[in-house]
Structure formats: C-alpha cells, structure tokens
Amino acid sequence: MNRPLLVPTALIGIAGVVAAVGVGSHGDQGVVVAGDSLTAQADAQINLVVTADGWQPIVQGVSGSSITNRNAVFDWSTRINELAALHPAVVVIELGTNDCGNCGDDSTPPSTVSSGRCATSDGWSG
C-alpha cells in the first residue's frame, strides 16, 4: 500500500471500530488511539470523527515510534499502561510500520514484534 493511502485507510479503520461499538452519546466513555506518525498526522481528523460520534478522544501519535522501540524514539510499554489506567471503552493501537526496518533485511524477529501487549475485555495483558 502506498503511503498517501495509509492515513485515509487508518481513519476508515478507526471509524469502523467506533461505529461497531456504537454511535451516539457516550458521555464519559473514552476512545484511546495510540500510534506512530500515521496517528500523529491524523490527530485532528481522528479527534473530529471520534468527538462527532459522541466519544471522548485521547489521541497520541509519536512519529518514528515502534512496537519494539527499535530506534529508541518512544517506549510505549509505560505509556500503554497509563492509557489503560484510564479505562477507555475502545482502544485502537496503530503501530508496526516502523518495525519493518528496510522491508526485508530487518533484524527484529517476528516473534518479538508479535509478543507485544494485547487489549482484553478485562484490561491489558502482556
């Protein structure tokens, strides 16, 4: 997929998740969207869509960040726990595009990338 299509595709995905959970007044229910530069570039649009659907958005995008913190840009492990402590109704994590290295000669084993934290109905597991 070429890069100009990634942000619109990510927005469609986020809108789909929020729509599946429900549209309307959600009071204090939060939607956490955390990710890399794709999330950072779409911050305003994500806030607009999520707020229009009646949710309380919490958006954090960090350019260059990755699941494994491969470039020492941002360590998501602490921040994800802080975001989970807010008890959001919906969590969208958009990470991984900076974990592929040079698309083929990456030294990060796939098992390391896939062993990240996962959202569960009861909270977070790692």
Image (cartoon, helix red, strand yellow):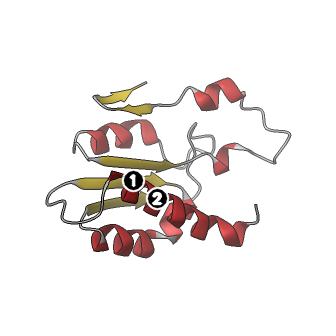
Q: Residue 62: x, y in percent?
A: 49, 58
The residue type indicated by label 2 comes to: Gly
Secondary structure of residue under mark 2? helix
Q: Residue at x 37, y 47 (%)?
A: 91
Q: Nearer the viewer, residue 14 or 59?
A: 14
- Any mark on residue 20, and which? 1
Q: Residue 38: x, y in percent?
A: 56, 63
Is residue 109 found left or right of 29 in the rendered image? Answer: right
- Any mark on residue 16, and which? 2
Farthest residue toward the right?
105
Is residue 76 found left or right of 98 in the rendered image? Answer: left
- Any mark on residue 70, and which? none
Quadrant into which the C terminus falls: top left
Label 2 Cα crowd, 10 Å radius (few <14 / some 14-19 / many 20+) = few
Q: Residue at x 72, y 32 (%)?
A: 108
Secondary structure of residue under mark 1? helix
Q: Residue at x 38, y 72 (%)?
A: 49
Image marks 2 and 1: residues in contact by CB distance under 8 Å? yes
Quadrant into which the N terminus falls: bottom right
Residue 31: which quarter of the image? bottom left
Residue 44 visible, this angle: yes
Vertically, is 63 above or below 122? Answer: below
The residue type indicated by label 1 comes to: Ala
Q: Residue at x 60, y 30 (%)?
A: 114
Vertically, is 109 above or below 43? Answer: above
Residue 4: which quarter of the image? bottom right
